[in-house]
Image (spheres, rainbow, N blue to C red):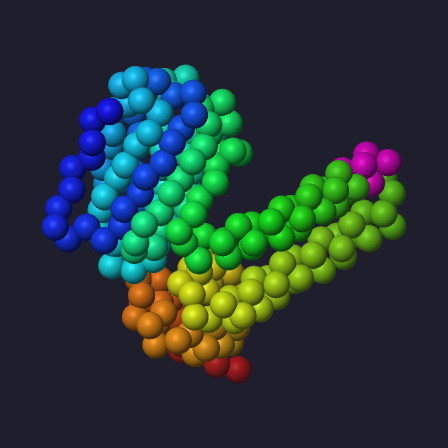
Amino acid sequence: MVAACSSEENNLHIQGKVQGLKKGTLYLQKVEDTSLVTIDSITMKGSETFAFETFIESPQILYLYLNKKDNNIYDDRIMFFAEPGEMIINTTLKKFEEDVIIEGSENQKKLLEYQAMMNLFNTRNLEIIQQSLKAQQEENTASLDSANVEYDQLLRRKYLFTVNFALNNKDLEIAPYLAISEVYDANLKYLDTIYTSLTPKVKESQYGQNLKEFLKERRENEQAQKDSAPQA
């Protein structure tokens, strides 16, 4: 294994194992200006273990990408909420995403909790879509209307759950992250409530600052729309 390069500023240390992997390349990535960029990479040669060291200003979403050269980029990337300190990521080659176990991050624990609930919402959403398609095929107006009403209710429940989840975790960076990634188009008062509730430390984090800037832009855009609206 060729070790990833490091510097004296490194504050995030990731080590782990990909069971069954003997040869391949692992990439540590992050989102920058809406694009995935590689922070570091490791060429695996006869070893299943790996280690990365890097610097992050505050907890943030990172990705571990495995290039298996199978032209499938959809099951080869693990998203995780990184925090400064020691983290452990263990998984398998066969089920790179499904088998992953991540330790060393409180934000990651909460992210998994949130994703578990979102899976339930998404499952019900698929069921409603199937009901809607069947109603269209059968030209059953009553069933179609019922499906549309339930879809709207489910969407509202999903948004309210996310807002409440963020408020209940105001001392973690996942709160502003969810606000700008999952409910960015929610009513401005909800986003304001989330930001106001954040602890000082979280407000100063990357996602806290991102939410602050996003709220500023939303207010400016809404004000501009009001100013440009024709007067009655």
Q: In this view, does 21 lie above or below 159?
A: above
Q: Residue at x 44, y 58 (%)?
A: 106
* Residue at x 56%, y 55% (from the top left corner): 114
Q: Which of 144 and 154 is in front in this view?
A: 154
Task: Give the answer, above or below, for where 91 lies relative to 211.
Answer: above
Q: Magenta segment range?
A: 133-138
Q: Measuring 66% from the left and 50% from the top, which residue is drawn there?
A: 121
Using the image as rendered, state which of residue 41 and residue 47 is in the foreground.
47
Magenta stretch secondary structure, dominant: helix
* Left or right for 21, reference 153: left
- Residue 230 in the image: state x and y as whole percent: 47, 76
Residue 176: image location, x then y, percent: 42, 65
Side of 196 where 27 appears, left or right: left
Which residue ends up furthest to the bottom in the rendered image? 232
At which x and y percent is residue 173? 40, 63
| Residue 217 image position (x, y, % from top left) | 35, 68
Residue 101 visible within the image: yes
107 within the magenta span: no
Residue 220 seen anywhere in this rendered image of the structure: no
Quarter of the image for the N terminus: give it: top left
